[in-house]
Image: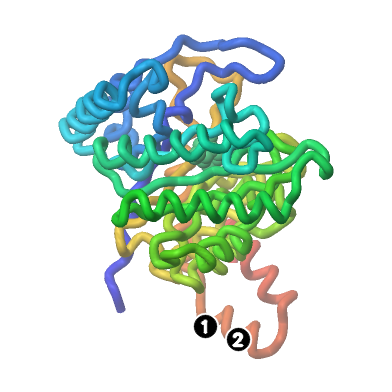
Amino acid sequence: MSEPTQYRFSFGPWNISEGADPFGPDVRQPVSMEAKFDLYRPLGFEGVQFHDDDVVENLEELSPEQALKRAGEVKSMLDDRGLIPEFVAPRLWFPTETIDGGFTSNSAADRQYAIDRSLRSIDIARAVGTKNIVLWLAREGTYIREAKNAKVAADRILGALNQMLDYDQEIEIWIEPKPNEPMDHTYIPTIGHALTLAYASKDPARVSGLIESAHAILAGLDPSDEMAFALAHNKLASVHLNDQNGLKFDQDKAFGSVNLRSAFNQVRVLEENGYGKNGEFVGLDVKVMRTQKGQPCLDHLKNSRETFLYLVEKVRTYDRSQEKAFIEARDYEGLDAYILRHLMGVS
Ligand code: 3MF
Ligand code: MG
């Protein structure tokens, strides 16, 4: 039997937040990026997820040279703390130019902005020490169906992907699907869409997927099946584990906090398929409750990581011979009860 996977964990600095929501302001003091880096290792995390402007704050006010110099400084901060930049994602949803989308905007000038910004974030990624680019295509979609031509949009997204692949022959692009929010509907809602783009691209080996639990749930899908589909194609580059209570705004709740069984099945699929054995991170993308006291608030990260590790134990102690017997007897009622009892710790 192969050695058990030693999982390593990542999160993005936005997971330590000030607590503003669309209906109320901040409830906590901001924490500087460098102070956030100090928190990673003690919490059991070694990977840092980045947006381009998490690496280089005020990116748009700086020249390319200034931005790369700053990215080099951030790399030193990471090196000093034994931290690894997992990926950089262009933030294609804040700037004015991206109001109507990035690659699929109806404005040619704004589409060009999105391409330029994406290429710039590749330079920043290389300078901070990663070849991995995440595309969460936040505003590539519509509020009303008639606003854009969906066929043209699909062509434009593929074109942008190919330009990024051409720009740097060593980068990998991980597409993070999400079906809605901020848009009514997006053009890349599921891993099936993301991997179709990967295979259609000019270098399929360098394009894969990142699955966030909440995003799959918002699409009405099972996160572990989405993960399994990507794993079957050897295209699960990363995950953003969290939870989501039904179809509403993207909640980014602590992993397992709504549906422990679904969390178990996500861990099961990862563990059974050797996820993490090639250095893939177990990424979290979780939001602390606005009500939480403390400065900074970190328990949502600590608890999500621990829940993952407890569930790894549940997967490793799951009785495969019983599972097999139930499946062979086609006794799924028995299997169902066995899983629940195993999760509850009773036999
Ligand atoms: C949105 C997300 C994003 C992406 C990240 C990468 C803010 O629902 O999950 O988190 O994970 O931004 O672009
Ligand atoms: Mg995410």
Could you say which disc has been placed on residue 321 in the image? 1
Separation of marks 1 and 2 at Cα, in angstroms? 6 Å
Identify the amino acid type marked 2. Answer: Ala
Identify the amino acid type marked 1. Answer: Ser
Judging depth in this view, the residue of 156 and 266 nearest the camera is 156
> Which residue is located at x 68 percent, y 19 percent?
22
Q: Is residue 275 visible?
A: yes
Q: Is residue 253 visible?
A: no
> Which residue is located at x 43 percent, y 43 percent?
305
Picture quarter containing residue 146? top right
Question: In the image, is residue 249 above or below residue 35?
Answer: below
Picture quarter containing residue 23? top right
> Which residue is located at x 35 percent, y 49 percent?
167
Q: Single out the residue that lies furthest toward the front.
A: 108
Q: Position of residue 55 (x, y in %)?
A: 34, 28
Picture quarter containing residue 123? top left
Q: How is the image coloured?
A: rainbow
Q: Single out the residue that lies furthest toward the bottom.
A: 328
Q: Position of residue 316 (x, y in %)?
A: 43, 67
Please state, as top left, top right, bottom left or bottom right, where the C terminus lies in the image. Answer: bottom right
Circle 1 SS class? helix
Judging depth in this view, the residue of 81 and 335 nearest the camera is 81
Cβ–Cβ under 8 Å for marks 1 and 2: yes
Q: Position of residue 279 (x, y in %)?
A: 30, 57
Could you say which disc has been placed on residue 204 in the image? none
In the picture of the structure, the residue carrying the numbered disc 2 is 325
